[in-house]
């Protein structure tokens, strides 16, 4: 009996030691990724304060999910706050107390939105820059022009504290920093013409890839908490809902957040996409119809 207890004791000690090694490794690897510096060449874009550009920027910001992390007043919002994932709030994008942008130059805005890198050179955690890097120079300039006009909000950002799940996801590459996903040498178009066609829809749909994947087949959302639902399949696969929707039904779903059968979209799906105008929604529908049919989650 004593020999058995001794073996159990040694086994427990080995398991504890391995657990400690794993915990230290996760901490070191995840922290190294967070502190890694990135150097990119920032190509300037035209940013003017004329009313038309600001209005265009407002529309883009309001329909691309910026408020989901930065709050409806852009003073910073909660991304997640729990024991497993930790605590992360979006930055205050206003010139108020606690805001990060009061001293930003135009190149800092471009670096953050197009490249996912802060002024200090580190990657911006969970900033979906891979969804915004495709923006034309004109649209990016419009977004920046608008954000510069947002009223000041005095709100300090709570200190970021990553939990064990976030640390593990960072270590194994399931949670990533945007600079790792972006082709920083790519040259974006000067402008993109709006039209109710698949070409313009492809341009808009880049904002869907963070959750639905690069081929839009949906499945597990790797950038979010483990309890997030699987993203819908946006390809015309026989088992996907969108394959059965008409253009009018698709538009109604995004506008009302309810499917044709009356069921509601999961709250994880940003309601801001419902603010896209008719031309944009028709373009998205046209683009999704051109995709190769793929089973859900096969990325």
Image (tube, grey):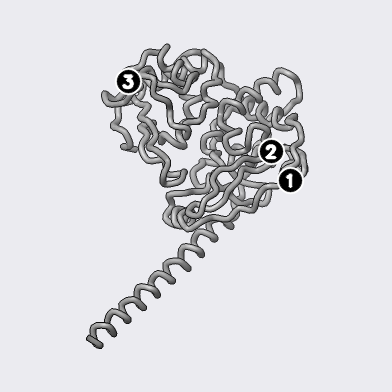
| Mark whose residue sits in front, 2 or 3 | 2
Q: Is residue 170 left or right of residue 295?
A: right
Are dots 1 and 3 in contact, CB under 8 Å? Answer: no
Q: Are marks 2 and 1 in contact (CB under 8 Å)?
A: yes
Residue 7 vs residue 49, the one in the foreground: 7
Q: Is 183 displayed left or right of 47 in the figure?
A: left
Instruction: Estimate the x, y position of residue 122 in percent, counting from the top left.
Output: 61, 52
Mark 2 neighbour density, 10 Å: few (under 14) some (14–19) many (20 or more): many
Residue that appears at 56% across and 20% down: 275
Q: 7 or 70: which is nearer to us?
A: 7
Q: What residue is disc 2 on?
A: 75
Is tag 2's residue or tag 3's residue first in the polypeptide sequence?
2
Q: Is residue 47 above or below residue 153?
A: above
Q: CA distance from mark 1 to mark 3?
A: 46 Å
> Which residue in the protein does label 1 denote?
98
Q: How many labels, in total?
A: 3
């Amino acid at each position: 009996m004593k020999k058995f207890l001794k073996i159990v004791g040694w086994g427990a000690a080995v398991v504890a030691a391995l657990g400690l090694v794993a915990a230290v490794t996760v901490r070191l690897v995840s922290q190294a990724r967070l502190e890694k510096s990135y150097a990119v060449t920032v190509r300037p874009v035209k940013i003017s304060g004329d009313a038309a550009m600001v209005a265009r920027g407002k529309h883009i910001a309001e329909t691309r999910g910026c408020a989901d992390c930065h709050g409806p007043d852009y003073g910073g919002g909660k991304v997640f706050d729990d024991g497993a994932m930790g605590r992360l709030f979006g930055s205050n994008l206003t010139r108020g107390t606690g805001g990060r942008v009061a001293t930003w130059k135009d190149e800092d805005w471009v670096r953050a939105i197009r490249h996912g890198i802060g002024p200090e050179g580190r990657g911006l955690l969970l900033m979906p820059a891979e969804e915004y890097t495709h923006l034309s120079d004109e649209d990016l300039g419009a977004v920046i022009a608008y954000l510069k006009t947002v009223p000041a909000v005095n709100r300090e950002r709570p200190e970021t504290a990553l939990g064990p799940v976030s640390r593990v996801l960072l270590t194994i590459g399931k949670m990533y920093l945007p600079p790792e996903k972006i082709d920083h040498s790519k040259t974006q178009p000067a402008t993109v013409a709006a039209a109710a066609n698949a070409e313009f829809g492809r341009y808009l749909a880049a904002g869907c890839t963070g959750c639905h994947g690069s081929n839009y087949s949906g499945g597990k959302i790797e950038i979010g908490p483990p309890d997030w639902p699987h993203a819908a399949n946006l390809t015309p696969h026989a088992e996907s809902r969108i394959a059965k929707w008409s253009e009018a039904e698709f538009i109604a779903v995004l506008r009302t957040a309810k499917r044709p059968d009356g069921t509601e979209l999961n709250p994880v799906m940003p309601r801001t996409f419902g603010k896209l105008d008719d031309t944009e929604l028709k373009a998205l529908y046209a683009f999704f119809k051109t995709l190769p049919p793929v089973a859900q989650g096969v990325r």
